[in-house]
Amino acid sequence: MASYSAQCAASTAELSSAELFENAKNYLVDGYSRPIVLEPHPNYLAYGKGCWAFDVDGNGRIDFTNNFGALIHGYSHPEIVKAITEQAGRAVCSTMPTSLETELAALICERLPTGDKIRFTNSGTEAVMLALKMARSIAGKPKIAKIEGGYHGQYEYIDSSSTPSPSQWGDPTEPPTIARNSGTPGYMLPQLVVLPCNDIESSRKILAKHKEALAAVIVDPMQLQVGYGRPEVEYLKALRDEATRLGILLIFDEVVAFRNGLNGTQGRVGVTPDITVLGKFIGGGLPVGAVCGSDEVMSVFKISREGPRVLHSGTFSANPLTMAAGAATMRLLTSEVFDRFQSLQDRLSDGMDSVLQTYGVDARLEQYCIGSTKLVFGSAQIRNWRDLYQYYQNHQLSKVAPLQEALLKRKVLVSRLSFLISSPMTEADIEVVLEAFDDAVKELAPQLRGECADLNGSVNQQATNSLT
Ligand SMILES: *Cc1c(COP(=O)(O)O)cnc(C)c1O
């Protein structure tokens, strides 16, 4: 081991991605700590600048994944780098608070319609766990309801029913709770109630049935998964009404959805949750999560003689490095930035749309939030998890994955054909993408038109499993 480390330190700089991946597999399961490894090997990042990511093999690509939205200002933004490096010289963590925590708290609470107070955690997963604890304490009841197919991080209680398959999923009007992991304790499953997305009538019935034991409903108000499908505004309003009527809390998971305009998705749809969960970009690219709510809701953390009603701590919670990067990021995220996101995404959508028409490909561009565009094949609507599963079956292996690979070869990095725009992107970058897109679609046109015998059949497990 020692000899490998020594050799590694001396020479990794010269190794190719393929060689680095071979070494990685000696020590890391599948060579990576995340389930998003590309075949035959991932491209190892050397550095990023603005919206471009450069790998160790010397390739540069426009990055539309932005680490799933965490890099809303791209790589190494000078002001964010400055904030991090200056703070690193002062302190990276401490039991003592810093004013940076208040600064970031104010920047977020002033924008979030339902945010009087906030608490920081180290990841979205942790923030979701905390939101569920809060809800149970406030409501005095144990169960939580989620939308079938919804992704809310890795906590095994809430990742159940995030990817059920047809052999498991049963009645569409009353979906069963399906463990996502082998080893999830059976006693957890009845504590999680599953709702069919966008089916108001069935969801109402299910909520009413469990109301005596139900503490909260959690929903991502912007997307079902990675931009695919979304709860309609009428559905969100119905959840709000039912929650109020039945005495349960409504939790919005805005870990990604907060990028949907200055006031998040709740600001856009005009539905107000009781608790909001945040994460991703609010930490400026460093690990972060947060829960936010009214003074009343957030008072569960207040310390009294018996201690707080709900314990929230964390060695690295609100660490000054994350707070500095987050505050710099939020200050840079002005309404002008959102306006630019909109004009860049309009240009991108229009351009891709005309390429698809030129080559006769049946696909559409969905603008599911400000600052992103998603390419969806066919005309079938994706309104819930089961539609989405069918979509993967029909298009993942035959169209989505090949087009993504063709784009990767042409300097465009995208995940699930969801183009997340970052603030350093320019009109010139969009033109580069459109040229690459034209070239890639031209090459694959017969396949994308469905004229080739395709590889349908087994759904790509990699695709349905790795949802972060
Ligand atoms: C990423 C994500 C999470 C989990 O956040 P982590 O920081 O990865 O733990 C939760 N909910 C949604 C909607 C997410 O996209």
Image (cartoon, helix red, strand yellow):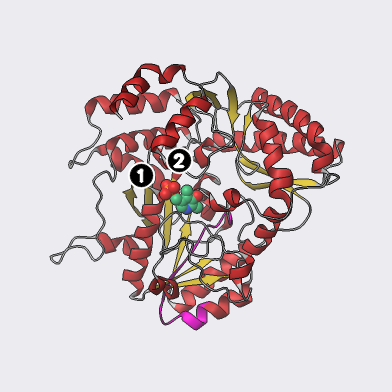
Q: Residue furthest left?
A: 305
Q: Which residues are magenta?
A: 207-224
The percent coordinates of residue 15 (x first, y second) are 47, 20
The answer to whether residue 111 is seen in the rendering is: no
Asked if residue 119 is among those painted magenta in the image, a careful observer would answer: no
Residue at the spot 46% in from the left edge and 43% down from the top edge: 34
Residue at the spot 80% in from the left edge and 31% down from the top edge: 443
Q: Nearest the camera: 125 or 18?
A: 18
Q: Which mark is residue 281?
A: 2
Q: Which numbered mark, 1 or 2, is in the foreground of this view?
A: 2
Mark 2 closeness class: few <14, some 14–19, many ≥20 residues within 10 Å: many
Residue at the spot 34% in from the left edge and 28% down from the top edge: 84
Could you tell me which secondary element the residue under label 2 belongs to? helix
Could you tell me which secondary element the residue under label 1 belongs to? helix
Q: Nearest the camera: 263 or 301?
A: 301
Report whether 409 appears left or right of 308.
right
Residue at the spot 68% in from the left edge and 61% down from the top edge: 387
Q: Is residue 10 above or below residue 139?
A: above
Q: Is mark 1 within 8 Å of ligand 1?
A: no
Distance, label 1 to label 2, CA atoms, is: 16 Å
Report whether 278 appears left or right of 388.
left
Mark 1 closeness class: few <14, some 14–19, many ≥20 residues within 10 Å: some
The percent coordinates of residue 340 (x first, y second) are 61, 33
Q: Is residue 293 above or below residue 427?
A: below
Asked if residue 221 is among those painted magenta in the image, a careful observer would answer: yes
| Residue type at tag 1 | Ala
The percent coordinates of residue 88 (x first, y second) are 27, 27
Q: Which mark is residue 106?
A: 1
